[in-house]
Amino acid sequence: MALLVCLISKLSPIKMAPVKILLVCLLLVSGVQHAVSADVVSAIETRMAAAGVPGLALVVIDKNDVVMSEAWGVRSLDTNEPLKPEDVFEAASNGKMLAAMAVLMLAEQGKLSLEDVVASDRLSSGCPPVTVKDLLSHTAGLGNDIGASQFTVDCNQRGHFAYAGEGYALLDEVIREASGQSSEAFIEQNILLPL
């Protein structure tokens, strides 16, 4: 089995500034080759052009060894500087899938319930209690200011989907409390390393 990681550099239409997005693709690959064939390069370049993707980095890891590392396009539309395989990408919200998986694993182990009420000194609410399920489903009535020291629940938004990074910041605390370790350590040991 090999881990294929695709890193895509994209221009944000809102801020009109380069934003890097991390896309993790898990593929079962047999007989991983150390070089990308001309057909694969052509397909990548064609799809990048069709989707308006200015840059893409691809890394294939097999048995903990990097067997391929390639980059296409540019890292910034402003400078047209070529993208390199070693360029660092932001994870953006892709960590949410790992946090959700960690929470579901802990629920399966009986260390928490999706119906557990979230108790955090960062959460202020005059609304009904917020549950782990509310945080996972973006229905807690929270906002997206993950850097705030205090999160306020909007009672009018409770039960309605509203993208909320704050909920996942609170799930970090839930994972830590249920697992007895940091969310980073739990995710690394229980999700990433077993890959």
Image (cartoon, rainbow, N blue to C red):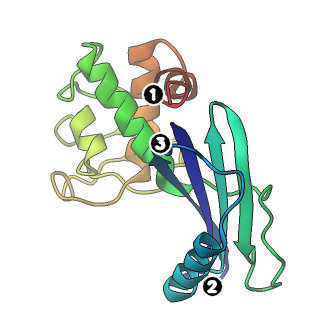
Q: Quadrant of residue 42?
A: bottom right
Residue 34 vs residue 77, the one in the foreground: 34
Three-letter residue code for mark 3: Gln
Characterize the local packing of mark 2: few (<14), some (14-19) or many (20 or more) Cα atoms within 10 angstroms: few
Q: Which mark is residue 173?
A: 1
The answer to whether residue 189 is above or below residue 126 is above
Mark number displayed over residue 150: 3
- Disc 3 element: loop
- Could you tell whether 150 is left or right of 38 in the image? left
Type of residue at label 2?
Answer: Met
Whether residue 122 is situated above or below residue 146 in the rendered picture: above
SS at circle 2: loop
Q: Amino acid at mark 1?
A: Glu
Q: Is residue 21 above or below residue 63?
A: below
Q: Nearer the viewer, mark 2 or mark 1?
A: 2
How far apart are the alpha carbons under marks 3 and 2? 30 Å
Q: Residue 14: image x %, image y %?
A: 53, 82
For mark 1, does the 10 Å Cα neighbourhood hold few (<14), some (14 to 19), or many (20 or more) residues? some
